[in-house]
Image (cartoon, rainbow, N blue to C red):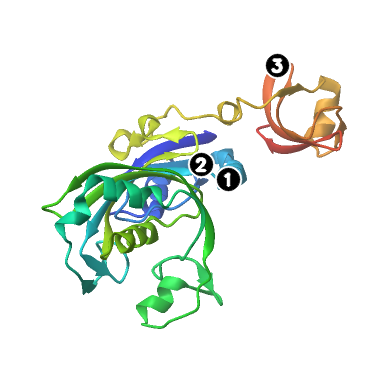
Amino acid sequence: MDGIIIINKPMNCTSHDIVQKVRKLLNIKKVGHTGTLDPMATGVLPLLVGKGTLCSKYLINHDKVYQVELTLGVKTDSADKEGNMIEEREVPRELFEEEKIKQVLASFLGKQEQMPPMYSAIKVKGKKLYEYARKGQTVEVQPRPIEIYEIKLLGKNEKKKQIVFQVHCSKGTYIRSLCENIAEKLGTVGYMSALNRIQVGEFSIEQAINMNQIKEGELLDILTIEQLFQEKQAIEVEEKRLQPFLNGVKLTMKKPDGVYRIYSTRKFIGIGIVSHEFLKRDIILE
């Protein structure tokens, strides 16, 4: 089994927990994921299975779409609902005027620098930020470039002091930090109280499988490596040139530089890369 399984991650488990469970259920050693979701978060978690793990480099830069619940009036040390409250402020009724909220959300569109939350896995001097945070230590953190492509209001609940919005953003965007920044711009404090990832690149929540649908020993329909690269052009390698190619020999190939699907006698062999009119193997299924 080689390819990608799109999982709808449930709440209160880590991405590593899901990897371990799928590895056990499918009896497959090689299982990995393309990007973690916090334990409290739900939604799309692409798992790479078998030789699908070799596709990781093609998937790590995907943009993402989230549905987010922001609770106003309270700030936590982790910027989400699992942290300890460190500040509380009033939330005036006028903050819930729809046009005001929409204007604030729209102000975050485009390229910008974002400060990561202290409770994150970014490493500084060899240690993860959350390791410093748990010890009450402070460390200088550099802002990171991100981009918000789209952000829109989905709903609001004045009684619960909550705003629900959807955001389409670049890799590396911290939604917890975004929530705090939105709250600050509204004139209060806030934290991320719910997060559902509904899309990663081309992988959507509609494709995702719930964990209870995976049963021990049962084969699943997975997205194959061939399907993953279906938009790439194909190259047919002559049978007499196939073995040298599989052995790592570069073949002369007058094609534009790029990634290609490789076939021989119309059978899918894997993925190759053309560079300066030479074709080299990359992901091979043989």
Q: The C terminus is located in which quarter?
A: top right
User: Please, what is the three-letter code of the amino acid marked with disc 2?
Assistant: Leu
Label 2, label 3: how far apart the Cα atoms are: 25 Å
Secondary element at image label 1: helix
- Looking at the picture, does residue 278 appear above or below residue 85? above
Secondary element at image label 2: strand
Q: Which residue is mark 3?
A: 266
**Quadrant of the rendered structure where residue 44 is?**
top left
Q: Which residue is mark 1?
A: 56
User: Please, what is the three-letter code of the amino acid marked with disc 3?
Assistant: Arg
Q: Which residue is mark 2?
A: 48
What residue is drawn where x is 46% and y is 42%?
Answer: 47
Q: Position of residue 227 (x, y in %)?
A: 56, 26
Closer-to-camera residue (126/85): 85
Sequence-first disc among 2 and 3: 2
Mark 2 and 1 residues: CB-CB less than 8 Å, in contact? Answer: yes
- Looking at the picture, does residue 134 appear above or below residue 8? below
Q: Position of residue 74 (x, y in %)?
A: 21, 66
Question: Could one spot residue 95 in this view of the protein?
Answer: yes
Mark 3 and 1 residues: CB-CB less than 8 Å, in contact? Answer: no
Mark 2 and 3 residues: CB-CB less than 8 Å, in contact? Answer: no
Closer-to-camera residue (80/115): 115
Q: Mark 1: give few (<14), some (14-19) or many (20+) Cα within 10 Å.
A: some
Q: Position of residue 16 (x, y in %)?
A: 41, 54
Q: Mark 3: give few (<14), some (14-19) or many (20+) Cα within 10 Å.
A: few
**244 on left or right of 104:** right
Q: Position of residue 125 (x, y in %)?
A: 56, 77
Sequence-first disc among 2 and 1: 2
As drawn, the residue found furthest toward the top would be: 266
Secondary element at image label 3: loop
Q: Nearer the viewer, mark 3 or mark 1?
A: 1
Closer-to-camera residue (70/16): 70
